[in-house]
Image (cartoon, helix red, strand yellow):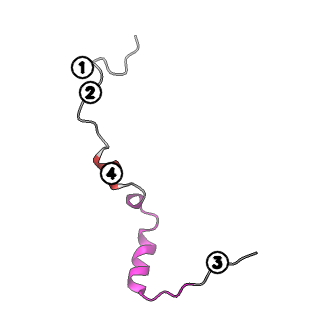
Amino acid sequence: MQTEPNYRIRNWSEHNKDLIQRGSPTTWIDEKAIKNWFSSHHTCPAGRCGNTF
């Protein structure tokens, strides 16, 4: 069984900032996804989007 290689942390201030940001949802969302989050065009008539009846 191989073990993970040991890395030396050389920049502790950056390492500590990364640990704080590790659980932030902003790190999970790609910039391209944010730019395309809302569509500028509608594909359904006004007032009828989502209504099936």
Q: Residue 14 occupies which quadrant of the picture?
A: bottom left
SS at circle 4: helix
Q: CA distance from mark 1 to mark 3?
A: 57 Å
Q: Which marked residue is nearer to the observer: mark 4 or mark 2?
A: 4
Label 3 CA crowd tier, 10 Å (few <14, some 14–19, many 20+): few
| Residue type pointed to by label 4 | Lys
Q: How many marks?
A: 4
Residues tagged 4 and 1 counted as in contact (Cβ below 8 A): no
Instruction: Give me the disc on residue 4.
Output: 3
Identify the residue shown where x is 23% and y is 35%. 40
| Residue type pointed to by label 3 | Glu
Q: CA distance from mark 4 to mark 1?
A: 28 Å
Instruction: Give me the disc on residue 46.
Output: 1
Residue range corresponding to the magenta coloring = 7-27
Magenta highlight on residue 50? no
Residues tagged 1 and 2 counted as in contact (Cβ below 8 A): yes
Q: CA distance from mark 4 to mark 3?
A: 32 Å
SS at circle 3: loop
Q: Main secondary structure of the magenta part?
A: helix
Left or right side of 22 for 7: right
Instruction: Give me the disc on residue 32.
Output: 4
Q: Earlier in the sequence, mark 4 or mark 3?
A: 3
Which residue does the numbered mark 2 point to in the structure image?
Answer: 42
Above-or-below relation of 11 to 52: below
Identify the residue shown where x is 69% and y is 78%. 3
Quadrant location, the C terminus: top left
Instruction: Give me the disc on residue 31.
Output: none
Q: Earlier in the sequence, mark 4 or mark 2?
A: 4
